Amino acid sequence: MKLYDGGRAPNPRRVRIFLAEKGIDVPLVPVDMAALEHRGEALTRLNPLKRLPILELDDGTVITESVAICRYFEELSPEPALFGTGALGRARVEMWQRRVEFGLLGTVSAAFRHLHPAMREWEVPQVSEWGEVNKRKAREFLCHLDGQLTEHAFIAGEEFSIADITALVAVQFLKPARIAMPEGLTNVARWYDNVATRPSATA
Amino acid sequence: MKLYDGGRAPNPRRVRIFLAEKGIDVPLVPVDMAALEHRGEALTRLNPLKRLPILELDDGTVITESVAICRYFEELSPEPALFGTGALGRARVEMWQRRVEFGLLGTVSAAFRHLHPAMREWEVPQVSEWGEVNKRKAREFLCHLDGQLTEHAFIAGEEFSIADITALVAVQFLKPARIAMPEGLTNVARWYDNVATRPSATA
């Protein structure tokens, strides 16, 4: 199998961090997103939605969408569990993964895509008012997250999970999106120091 | 346990259809979303993000996010499998569930929230340009979906799944969102006639 990778972009990074946490080695095929290579003919055949990453199995089967690729590897190699364990544990991870995805990664990405000059060819049309709304939503969500992290070591509870990976990637995307971390979020800061220094964070 | 329900809104409906497909009966607590009851003090205590549905277990544990609630019941009652079976089957359902969620339910909802006069108090500020962009994205995704349905009975393959539930709810939300179904999508039409006449669709 091989993984068509997109370098520093948040979604390809999520999958690389997930694989590093699992200790799974998948050959990467680098794709130059800056040159819009992921929108070229060859990759559009694999993913008509023109997004990365893309996992291609040896028989040609294609899986796209970061979380779907992660879930495929969770099913193949259940340990360490990154989608939770037991009915309630899995539901909790799903709940927080979605909250973080919509409330943080989604809003930070929207701010970046609708406001950054480098995104003019990517996001057509850029709607700057929508970008500004998302800056606010991202900051509001971080305050909400600080509350959750008062009581828990990790986002979905006491175990590291895919929700932490999504949040880590989103927090590191604040800078390119030109969003300032709200002041005084000591629990987010403690959590960030913890997850950003795990070996997987360099993946 | 009890499920705080939101009537005709798409997310509460997704969970009710899911439960009907599983044959699971959960006592519903009706919440009057039109009167903004889900933003009141009692429900904000259960879900600080002020959204429905909310599942409350007998010990007071709260699960929010429609797909997390569905996954909880999938774990408790695996049959019929609505999140797929096997590593590849589960990855396929996750992939299509996400594609439909972002490409269709998300875009139709954004068009509704940012353009409909009834949403003025809900979506602040309404960004009409963003609403119009989403009308276009929703129509584009439906054309893409028609291609997938050329080859398959259901969205994620030959088995009915949560991706079909998300898509059914989204297609039925086109009308309030004032989005016209693109003409000539014969595969979407065939799929819709099939899923909209299942007994669960009235849930």
Image (cartoon, coloured by chain):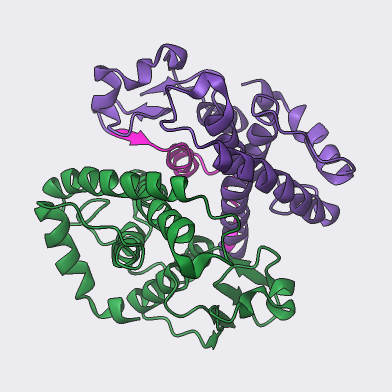
Chain colours: A purple, B green
When the figure is inspected, residue A30 is found, relative to residue A19, above or below; the finding is above
What x and y, as percent, mark residue A72?
A: 43, 41
Which corner quadrant holds the C terminus of chain B?
bottom left
Q: Quadrant of residue A64?
A: top left
Residue at the spot 62% in from the left edge and 76% down from the top edge: B38
Q: In the rendered view, tell whether residue A67 sits above or below residue A59.
A: below
Residue B159: x and y, percent?
23, 59
Decide which of A138, B64 is in the foreground and name it: A138
| Range of residues picked out in magenta | A62-86
Q: Is residue B192 above or below residue A121?
A: below
Q: Quadrant of residue B63?
A: bottom right
Give left or right: position of A28 versus A88.
left
The answer to whether residue B56 is visible is no
- Dividing the picture into quadrants, the one containing residue A4 is top left
Query: Is residue A134 toward the left or the right of residue B110 in the image?
Result: right
Check residue A7 for magenta coloring.
no
